[in-house]
Image (cartoon, grey):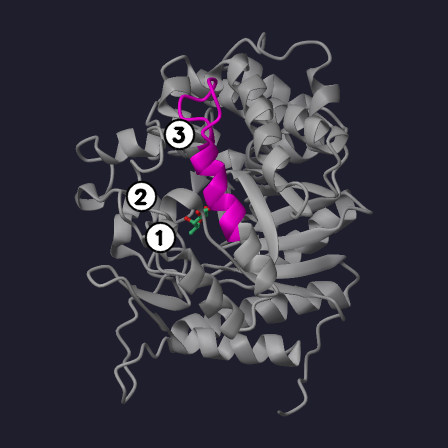
Amino acid sequence: MSEPTLRFPDGFVWGGATAAYQIEGAAREDGRGPSIWDTFSRTPGAVFQGHTGDVACDHYHRYAGDVALMAELGLRAYRFSVSWPRVRPDGTGPVEPRGLDFYDRLTDALLDAGLDPIVTLYHWDLPQALEDRGGWTVRETAEHFAEYALAVHGRLGDRVRTWTTLNEPWCSAYLGYGSGVHAPGRRDAGDAFRAVHHLLLGHGLAARALRAAGAETLGITLNLADVQPADAGSAADAEAVRLVDGLHNRIFLDPLTGGGYPADVLAHVSRIVAPDFIRDGDEKLIAAPLDLLGLNYYAPTYVAGRPGGAGGDAYPGTAGAVEFLPPAGPLTEMGWSIEPAGLTRLLERVAADHPGLPLMITENGGAFPDTGLDERGGVADADRVAYLDGHLRAAHEAIARGVDLRGYLVWSVLDNFEWAEGYRKRFGIVHVDYLTQRRTPKHSARWYQEVIARNGL
Ligand code: FCB
């Protein structure tokens, strides 16, 4: 094997990521209760062609083969999420041991195969019973989240070292309660901000409880945005950047790292809803010490400051002031721009603003049409290889500039249920035939296998 020209640090964690609702299927098995995504995917018009996660990749039954495949590809870590409604079907009542049994088996299979399990406790599948009582717009949900987190830790804590609480609370809050394109599909700016706060509070309560229970490495995953001005010389665009960056990044980062909510963001929120849901002491609870910050990066965001601008549905209060630029090419199949430099900028910015906080890329990858075939009928996904290669170079550049980046987890190990897009968008490095459930590594999987083996590019 040739020597890499770009080497990653020794011990760099190479892995892949998935999420429960996107791959598990078995939606009504072993006592699992309904989640907001079961309900939402059955809402007419909400998900492409009414696709649901009922069967998905049938990973619930096929996990052993999936773990063996990951081991064959050389992955060292696997980030999966635990389904809250499998563990506590109605969100608050008795724990369902059969739900925990599944994650117990999965954890053992991973460890036996030499993969480090990285657990995400919440990747968007809130028990429907809790949504019926207000969901993330009410404080009790945060408290129930901490109880559920402890139940999972009670079963897996002897083997799982790395725990992350939430995946992308930005999406849960703003897409779930603001623009309504994700479950539960509510559209109310005030509710979006209530959800932001209760998600953060849930993180803080869970992190404290897990720490007390002995969890080793505690973190959270954010989909921070690399927000850039349309015109670097424009004061109006700089102001738009400040507003969007506040709503997307600082509203999470600052309280999580002990700074509390930024004053400018709080002032903006207060113009939309009275922030009486933030109680004394909450910011302290949210600031539970973090050992690791997970970043998911896909594409940059370009904005301009424009009176009368359309704003963004997922950015309450930006209409009339901000214009979001249409993504510039080249684009992935999601219509997201491919700009690896945004990843370097983002990593450097977080490292500069929050020194001493180890970072991990917990998701990065691309959806492409996957129409290229090789002579044996395998998926020749050159565009995905190029996307991943570009972003790994960008990550390496950040490390070279001093960022403490500990690992990279590709999104995703398998093609899967891509939320509102259903199964039509494929992010996997492994192709899934949804009729036969056959898994076939794409060229990107073999390419990634070599990257891991060389620890470099
Ligand atoms: C992220 C989600 C993940 C996946 C990718 C494409 O926002 O965390 O589940 O859908 O986008």
Q: Earlier in the sequence, mark 1 or mark 3?
A: 1
Place residue 198 in its image quadrant: top right
Left/right placement of residue 56 relative to residue 95 reads: left
In the rendered image, the quadrant that contains the N terminus is bottom right
- Give yes or no for contact between labels 2 and 1 (Cβ–Cβ under 8 Å): yes
Residue sitting at 50 percent across and 52 percent down? 106
Residue beneath disc 2: 26
Magenta-colored span: 87-106
Foreground mark, 3 or 2? 2
Rounded to the nearest angstrom, the CA distance separating label 3 from label 2 is: 24 Å
> Which numbered disc covers residue 176?
3
Mark 3 or 2, nearer chain start: 2
Residue 330 at x, y percent in the picture: 40, 66
Residue 395: where, in percent of width, then height? 64, 64
Circle 3: is it few (<14), some (14-19), or many (20+) Cα within 10 Å? many
Q: Report the amino acid beneath label 1.
A: His
Instruction: Tell me what residue is drawn at x 30 percent, y 42 percent.
Output: 420
Distance of label 2 from label 1 (alpha carbons): 8 Å
> Residue at image x 62%, y 22%?
201
Looking at the image, residue 195 sits to the left or right of residue 201; the answer is: left
Say what secondary structure mark 2 lies in: loop
The amino acid at mark 2 is Ala
At horizontal 72% and vertical 21% (from top left) the residue drawn is 285
According to the picture, the residue beneath numbered tag 1 turns out to be 61
Q: From the viewer's perspective, tell me whether residue 160 is left or right of residue 307.
A: right
